[in-house]
Amino acid sequence: MARTRTGVRALGALLAVVLGVSVAGCSSTGGKRAEDARKAEAAAGKAAVNTPRWTFAMVTHSGDGDTFWDIVQNGAEQAAAKDNINFLYSKSDEGQQQAQLVQAAIDKKVDGLIVTLAKPDAMKAVVKKAVAAGIPVITVNSGSAQSKAYGALTHIGQDETVAGEAVGDELDKRGKKKALCVLHEQGNVGHEQRCAGAKKTFDGTMQNLYVDGTNMPDVQASIEAKLQADRSIDSVVTLGAPFAATAVKAKKSAGSKAEIDTFDLNAEVAGALKTGTLGFAVDQQPYLQGYEAVDLLWLYRYNADVLGGGQPVLTGPQIITRDMAAALEDYTERGTR
C-alpha cells in the first residue's frame, strides 16, 4: 500500500507540472494570440459584441462642408462598428428638411435615433412621434433645454450658455474691451446662447454680427466691413472652426489688430493656435458626442441603461490655447478632435 500511495503522489506531482506548463503556455501564447486577434478585428471595423444588428439613424443640422460634423460622424461610425450597429447618417441645415429626414428614419423603423435640436420648434412634433413609435431618442450638440420635454433619453453635448460664459471670462483674462460675435446660422438657438453667455460674463462690450454661413465670401466681407468701420474692436469670436480662417482673412484685409477666437476645434484651428494666428478655441469634443450617442443607445437597447439622471451629459467646454495645441494636433489630424 505504501508503494502504491507513493506512486500516486508521484503521478500527481507529474500531472501538476504538466498542467502548470500547459497553463503557462496558454497565458503566454494563447492569451497573446487572442488579444492580437481582438486588436485586428477592431482595426478592421469588426464588432466587439455579439448583440443583434440594430439600426441607428443620426440626423443633424449640419450644412455642407462643416468639418465639425465630420468629426461627430467619425465618432458615431467608430462606435457603431464596435457595437455591431448598422449606422445611417443624414443632414440638413433647414429645420423642415431635417424633420423630414427624421420622419424617413421613423418610416424605416430604426431601432434608435440620434438628432440635433438647433431649430427645436421644427423638430418637436417629429421627435415626439419617434418616441411614441417606441424608438429611443438621444439628442446631441444642441437642444439640451428641450431634450427631456420632447421625450429623449438624454442629451449629450456642452451647455451653450456655460460655453459662452467661458468665452467671456477668457476675453476678460486677455484684457479685451470690445468684441464681435459672428453668428453664421440664423435661427440656431445654440448660437444665440453662446453669444448671450459671452456677453453675460464679458466686462467689455460685445456686438452680434449675423452672416450667411453658406457664403464664405459674404462672411469675409461682412467681418471686414465691421473691422474697417470700428477700429476699437479687439476681438472677433466665430462660432465654428471653418469660420475662424475666414475671419483671419477679413482681419488681414481690414488691417485690423483684433484677436480672432473661435468655438470648436479641427486640424486647421490647432495649427493656427500653434502659430498664434488664433488666440483660443472652445472645444466641445464632437467625436465624443457622436461616439457616446451611439454607445448609449446600444447600452439602452442591450441593458436598459440611461446616463445623466435626467441631466445632460456634458462634453465641454474646454478652452484650448497656444500651449495646449501641439498636444492635440495629432488627434485633430486623424479627425477625432
Image: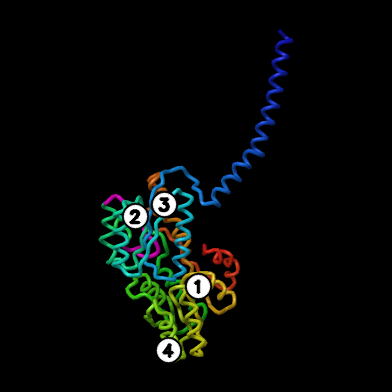
Query: Which is in the foreground here, disc 4 or disc 3?
Result: 3
x, y percent for residue 242: 47, 74
Give the mark nearest the N terminus, 3 or 2.
Answer: 3
Q: Which residue is mark 4?
A: 225
Asked if disc 2 and disc 1 are in contact, CB closer than 8 Å, the reply is no
The part of the chain drawn in magenta is 133-146
Earlier in the chain: of badge 2 and badge 1, it is: 2
Amino acid carrying label 1: it is Ala
Asked whether the residues under the numbered discs 1 and 4 touch, taking CB atoms below 8 Å apart as contact, a structural biologist would say no
- Quarter occupied by the N terminus: top right
Tell me which label, 4 or 2, sits earlier in the chain: 2
Residue located at (45% from left, 78% from top):
237
Residue at 39% in and 68% down: 62
Q: Secondary structure at mark 2?
A: strand
Q: Secondary structure at mark 3?
A: strand
Q: Report the amino acid beneath label 2.
A: Val
The amino acid type found where label 4 is placed reads Ala
Secondary structure beneath disc 1?
strand
Against 309, is 270 above or below? below
The CA distance from mark 1 to mark 3 is 34 Å
| Rendered image: mark on residue 281 | 1
In the rendered image, the vertical position of residue 9 relative to residue 76, given as above or below: above
Give the vertical position of 299 relative to 185 (above or below). above
Q: CA distance from mark 3 to mark 2?
A: 16 Å
Q: Residue at x 43, y 43 (%)?
A: 51
- Image location (x, y in percent) of residue 264: 47, 70
How many angstroms separate mark 4 from mark 3 (CA)? 48 Å
Q: Which residue is mark 3?
A: 86
Q: Residues within 10 Å of mark 1 (few under 14, many from 20)?
A: many
Residue 146 lies in quadrant: bottom left
Q: Is residue 9 left or right of residue 236?
A: right
